[in-house]
Amino acid sequence: SFDVLGLGAGAGALLTLQSARLWVPANLFGLGLWRASRKGVGGPLLIPIFILAVSALVHGLRLATGCPVPDARAAGWLMAEVVGEPASALWRSLSPSLVRWDVLFSAAALKQLVCAALFGPLVNTVLN
Protein backbone atom coordinates (compact mmCIF):
# COMPACT_ATOMS: atom_id res chain seq x y z
CA SER A 1 0.00 0.00 0.00
CA PHE A 2 1.03 3.59 -0.39
CA ASP A 3 1.28 4.01 3.39
CA VAL A 4 3.71 1.09 3.75
CA LEU A 5 5.92 2.50 1.01
CA GLY A 6 5.74 5.96 2.57
CA LEU A 7 4.29 7.48 -0.59
CA GLY A 8 1.45 9.84 -1.32
CA ALA A 9 -1.84 8.44 -2.54
CA GLY A 10 -1.35 9.52 -6.15
CA ALA A 11 -0.52 7.15 -8.97
CA GLY A 12 2.40 9.38 -9.96
CA ALA A 13 4.12 8.39 -6.73
CA LEU A 14 4.63 4.89 -8.15
CA LEU A 15 6.81 6.25 -10.94
CA THR A 16 9.42 7.80 -8.68
CA LEU A 17 12.78 6.05 -8.37
CA GLN A 18 12.25 5.59 -4.63
CA SER A 19 9.10 3.53 -5.10
CA ALA A 20 10.10 1.81 -8.37
CA ARG A 21 13.11 0.19 -6.69
CA LEU A 22 10.65 -1.64 -4.44
CA TRP A 23 7.79 -2.58 -6.74
CA VAL A 24 9.68 -3.38 -9.97
CA PRO A 25 11.69 -6.30 -8.49
CA ALA A 26 8.59 -7.61 -6.71
CA ASN A 27 6.61 -7.60 -9.95
CA LEU A 28 9.44 -9.22 -11.89
CA PHE A 29 9.67 -11.98 -9.29
CA GLY A 30 5.89 -12.38 -9.43
CA LEU A 31 5.93 -12.70 -13.23
CA GLY A 32 8.74 -15.25 -13.00
CA LEU A 33 6.77 -17.27 -10.47
CA TRP A 34 3.66 -17.10 -12.66
CA ARG A 35 5.59 -18.23 -15.76
CA ALA A 36 7.23 -21.08 -13.87
CA SER A 37 3.87 -22.28 -12.56
CA ARG A 38 2.38 -22.13 -16.07
CA LYS A 39 5.20 -24.26 -17.45
CA GLY A 40 4.73 -26.88 -14.72
CA VAL A 41 8.15 -26.28 -13.14
CA GLY A 42 8.56 -27.46 -9.56
CA GLY A 43 5.06 -28.77 -8.87
CA PRO A 44 4.12 -28.50 -5.19
CA LEU A 45 7.65 -27.43 -4.25
CA LEU A 46 7.58 -24.33 -6.45
CA ILE A 47 6.36 -21.89 -3.79
CA PRO A 48 8.66 -23.09 -0.95
CA ILE A 49 11.68 -23.12 -3.29
CA PHE A 50 10.75 -19.68 -4.61
CA ILE A 51 10.45 -18.22 -1.09
CA LEU A 52 13.80 -19.70 -0.04
CA ALA A 53 15.50 -18.55 -3.25
CA VAL A 54 14.20 -14.96 -2.98
CA SER A 55 15.17 -14.81 0.72
CA ALA A 56 18.66 -16.10 -0.09
CA LEU A 57 18.99 -13.60 -2.95
CA VAL A 58 17.87 -10.60 -0.87
CA HIS A 59 20.11 -11.47 2.07
CA GLY A 60 23.00 -12.39 -0.23
CA LEU A 61 22.79 -8.99 -1.92
CA ARG A 62 22.44 -7.33 1.46
CA LEU A 63 25.59 -9.06 2.74
CA ALA A 64 27.51 -8.43 -0.50
CA THR A 65 26.77 -4.71 -0.31
CA GLY A 66 27.54 -4.55 3.41
CA CYS A 67 24.07 -3.27 4.28
CA PRO A 68 23.18 -3.96 7.92
CA VAL A 69 19.72 -5.31 8.78
CA PRO A 70 18.41 -2.07 10.37
CA ASP A 71 19.35 -0.10 7.25
CA ALA A 72 17.69 -2.68 4.99
CA ARG A 73 14.54 -2.44 7.12
CA ALA A 74 14.58 1.35 6.96
CA ALA A 75 14.95 1.22 3.16
CA GLY A 76 11.95 -1.12 2.84
CA TRP A 77 13.85 -4.24 1.70
CA LEU A 78 13.09 -6.20 4.86
CA MET A 79 9.97 -6.37 7.00
CA ALA A 80 9.81 -4.42 10.22
CA GLU A 81 10.89 -6.24 13.35
CA VAL A 82 8.00 -7.69 15.32
CA VAL A 83 7.74 -8.81 18.90
CA GLY A 84 6.36 -12.29 19.15
CA GLU A 85 5.70 -15.05 21.58
CA PRO A 86 6.82 -18.67 21.58
CA ALA A 87 4.72 -21.04 19.49
CA SER A 88 3.61 -22.75 22.68
CA ALA A 89 1.66 -19.60 23.65
CA LEU A 90 -1.09 -20.63 21.23
CA TRP A 91 -1.61 -23.95 23.00
CA ARG A 92 -1.53 -22.35 26.44
CA SER A 93 -4.29 -19.95 25.43
CA LEU A 94 -6.43 -22.73 23.93
CA SER A 95 -9.17 -23.33 26.42
CA PRO A 96 -12.83 -24.23 25.77
CA SER A 97 -13.82 -22.07 28.73
CA LEU A 98 -12.75 -18.99 26.75
CA VAL A 99 -15.24 -19.70 23.93
CA ARG A 100 -18.47 -17.70 23.97
CA TRP A 101 -20.74 -20.70 23.31
CA ASP A 102 -23.88 -18.59 23.58
CA VAL A 103 -22.71 -16.43 20.67
CA LEU A 104 -21.45 -19.38 18.64
CA PHE A 105 -24.77 -21.24 18.90
CA SER A 106 -26.98 -18.20 18.33
CA ALA A 107 -29.28 -18.28 15.31
CA ALA A 108 -27.35 -15.61 13.41
CA ALA A 109 -23.98 -17.31 13.92
CA LEU A 110 -25.32 -20.75 12.99
CA LYS A 111 -26.87 -19.32 9.82
CA GLN A 112 -23.53 -17.83 8.79
CA LEU A 113 -21.60 -21.00 9.64
CA VAL A 114 -23.95 -23.20 7.64
CA CYS A 115 -23.88 -20.81 4.66
CA ALA A 116 -20.08 -20.72 4.76
CA ALA A 117 -19.85 -24.51 4.97
CA LEU A 118 -22.28 -25.01 2.07
CA PHE A 119 -21.43 -22.16 -0.28
CA GLY A 120 -17.72 -21.70 0.44
CA PRO A 121 -16.61 -24.80 -1.46
CA LEU A 122 -19.03 -23.96 -4.28
CA VAL A 123 -17.68 -20.43 -4.72
CA ASN A 124 -14.12 -21.72 -4.44
CA THR A 125 -14.77 -24.26 -7.21
CA VAL A 126 -16.31 -21.64 -9.51
CA LEU A 127 -13.50 -19.12 -8.96
CA ASN A 128 -10.69 -21.61 -9.30
Image: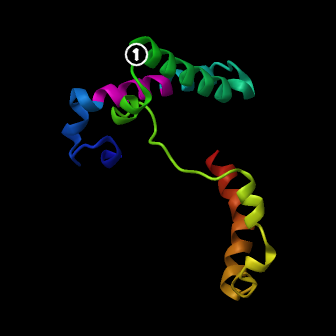
Task: Quadrant for residue 43, please give it.
Answer: top right
Instruction: Give the vertical position of 94 relative to 49 (above or below).
Output: below
User: What secondary structure is the stretch in magenta mostly built from?
Assistant: helix
Q: Is residue 49 left or right of residue 81?
A: right
In magenta segment, residue 8: no
Instruction: Give the vertical position of 94 relative to 53 (above or below).
Output: below
Q: Position of residue 38 (x, y in %)?
A: 61, 23
What residue is rendered at 63% in x and 53% in y?
A: 85
Pick whichever, 122 or 81, lies toward us.
81
Task: Quadrant for residue 15, please give it.
Answer: top left
Q: Is residue 36 left or right of residue 6?
A: right
Pick whichever, 86 or 51, lies toward us.
86
Q: Position of residue 77 (x, y in %)?
A: 41, 30
Q: Position of residue 23 (x, y in %)?
A: 36, 31
Q: Amino acid at mark 1?
A: Gly
What residue occupies the far right of the structure in this picture? 96
**Helix, strand or loop status at disc 1:** loop
What residue is rendered at 60% in x and 28% in y?
A: 51
Q: Is residue 96 left or right of residue 71?
A: right
What residue is rendered at 67% in x and 18% in y?
A: 41
Residue that label 1 marks: 66
Mark 1 is surrounded, within 10 Å at the Cα level, by few (under 14), some (14 to 19) or many (20 or more) other residues, namely: few
Range of magenta residues: 20-30
In magenta segment, residue 23: yes
What residue occupies the far top of the structure in this picture? 64
Pick whichever, 123 or 30, lies toward us.
30
Instruction: Give the vertical position of 109 relative to 6 (above or below).
Output: below
- Name the colouring of the figure: rainbow
